[in-house]
Amino acid sequence: MSKVVLITGGSSGIGKSVGEFLLQKGFIVYGTSRNPQNNPNHPFQLIALDVTNVETIQKAIDKVISNEGRIDVLVNNAGMGITGPIEETPTQEMRNVFETNFFGAIEVMKAVLPQMRQQKRGLIINVTSIAGYMGLPFRGIYSATKGALEIVTEAIRMEVKGFGIHITNVAPGDFATNIASGRYHTPVFENSPYKKTYQENLDLMNAHVDSGSDPLEMAKAIYKITQTSKPKVHYKVGNFMQKFSIVLKKILPDTIYEKLLMNHYKL
């Protein structure tokens, strides 16, 4: 029997690649978008859903259950980026990103868990980020949202395991997607003490995304997780140095690791 998968943020980038790949593997795929009408020729069905609006979350999940009778896999992929010196980034913009990346992901999990508990099975895959394993300069708030979701996943997976539900994290590195276009960018202010270093780091971030890996790698990794009966707590998908940076953080003294990051970001 084909598995039913719901992918938040399925209109582009990693979400779209995952949906297309799972479709090829025989899954029944539903994606979500705030404005599905903007993607009329999408390869799989898109449902309206805004992760910051609980009513739209429930409507989308109810629609999938009404159509298919179940939801086997949730890929919690919807998210947004934010850049800027923390001192100069509006606090409300920080809250907005937490609402999407952290609380939004939690709300979707809360909405799908009753159905999975009734089924006595289900898999939730939270898409986080390798950036969530460390505080990155000018991306500290983004790192914080993804790191927070990693920790919450560790907790909730223990809470629901007795119901036959598995929850895991997948942390991607830099992938060639359109995430940069959807970020909130704190402006580079002319009189800012961060003007030079922030602009250099913005250029570096955009270059990393432009030269990032093929999102198909994430699609293959997520498919592989759906095929295992005992998913791990954490998965990392990225190039060697991105994954190795997490290992280095574990084994190096904090100040030495900080120096490595500062050298990398030319600070």
Image (spheres, rainbow, N blue to C red):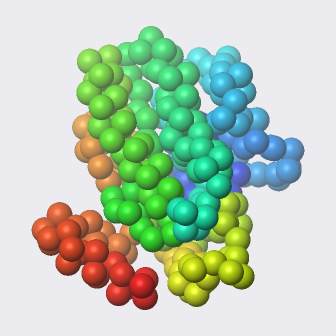
Q: In this view, does 145 lie to the left or right of 8?
A: left
Give the x, y percent position of residue 50: 70, 37
Give the x, y percent position of residue 266: 43, 88
| Residue drawn 76% across the image and 35% down it | 48
Q: Residue 53 occupies which quadrant of the picture?
A: top right
Q: In this view, does 183 lie to the left or right of 225?
A: right
| Residue drawn 63% across the image and 78% down it | 192
Q: Measured along the vertical axis of the image, is residue 26 above or below residue 39?
A: above
The C terminus - image quarter: bottom left
| Residue drawn 68% across the image and 40% down it | 32
Q: In this view, does 103 lie to the left or right of 34?
A: left
| Residue drawn 44% across the image and 58% down it | 143
Give the x, y percent position of residue 107: 55, 28
Give the x, y percent position of residue 260: 28, 82
Q: Residue 160 occupies which quadrant of the picture?
A: top left
Say whether residue 176 is visible.
yes
**Which of the two residues, 109 or 141, is positioned nearer the viewer here?**
141
